[in-house]
Image (cartoon, grey):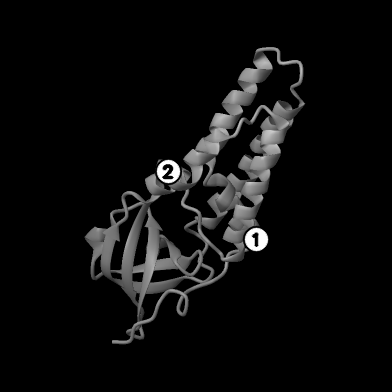
Amino acid sequence: MERANGSNHGGKKMSIITGFSMFFLSFFPLWISVLFLDIKSICEGNPNIQTEAISVLLILIVSIISLIILMLEFNPKNMQGSQEYSIITAIEEKTITADFLLSYILPLFAFDFTVWSEVVLFLVFFFVFAFLSIRHSHFSVNILLELMNYRFYSCELKNEDGISISKTVICQEILSARIGETILVRPINNEYAVKLNEEKQH
């Protein structure tokens, strides 16, 4: 049996817009906290609310646009680039989102988002991080996917040519119960893929 990694078979690079949307939404807990602090500052009658007002407006607009793009990316009717694979192994990753929150998001709460100089410092860090993530087509783990009941599985898959690849498959069902069955997936990048509805393929 031939074996290949995900970068050689079934891989792709995300568009800049999709990559940024995924990256932005991965900070969802932080944006909720920033909105709370900014709205609280405005309601308390802070005389200089320009920073808070701009922050609230931008977060809401970018969040709505990014959420729409996320829904399109995970649309089970989008069969573009999809492939059928047999599941050899499927192990659920249960701590992947928690690890991301602790490693990347929690440290950012050190910034004071009601002070413009602190916001500038945060934006420098945020956009450098975003640039690196998008440049390398990195999929940012998204807590919204967890809230939408998506699960992450480290899978070994085999295509119809007998070539085996490794992918992290995102789906809303218990994939470990389908070992040996065939599924339809669409790659998000070289490492991640989303499972599609097999019933929708015709």
Q: Position of residue 122 (x, y in %)?
A: 64, 41
User: Disc 2 residue type?
Assistant: Leu
For image coordinates 63% across by 48% down, the residue present is 125
Q: Nearer the viewer, residue 179 or 77?
A: 179
Drawn side of residue 60 relative to residue 172, left or right? right
Q: Nearer the viewer, residue 60 or 74?
A: 60
How many marks on residues? 2
Q: Residues within 10 Å of mark 2 (few under 14, many from 20)?
A: few
Quarter of the rendering occupied by the C terminus = bottom left
Q: Position of residue 136 (x, y in %)?
A: 57, 66
Q: Is residue 162 above or below residue 116?
A: below
Q: Is residue 170 above or below residue 2?
A: above
Q: Position of residue 22 (x, y in %)?
A: 55, 52
Q: Is tag 1's residue or tag 2's residue first in the polypeptide sequence?
A: 1
For image coordinates 56% across by 51% down, the residue present is 23
Secondary structure under badge 1?
A: helix
- Residues marked 1 and 2 touching at CB (< 8 Å): no
The CA distance from mark 1 to mark 2 is 26 Å
**Residue under pointer 1:** 16
**Residue under pointer 2:** 102
Secondary structure under badge 2?
A: helix
Q: Is residue 74 above or below residue 49?
A: below
Q: Position of residue 70 (x, y in %)?
A: 55, 51
- Tell me where residue 44 sits by quadrant: top right
Q: Is residue 156 above or below residue 161?
A: above
Note whether residue 78 is visible: yes
Q: Residue furthest top?
A: 45
- Label disc, if present, on residue 90 of the rendered structure: none
Drawn side of residue 155 relative to residue 34, left or right? left
User: Disc 1 residue type?
Assistant: Ile
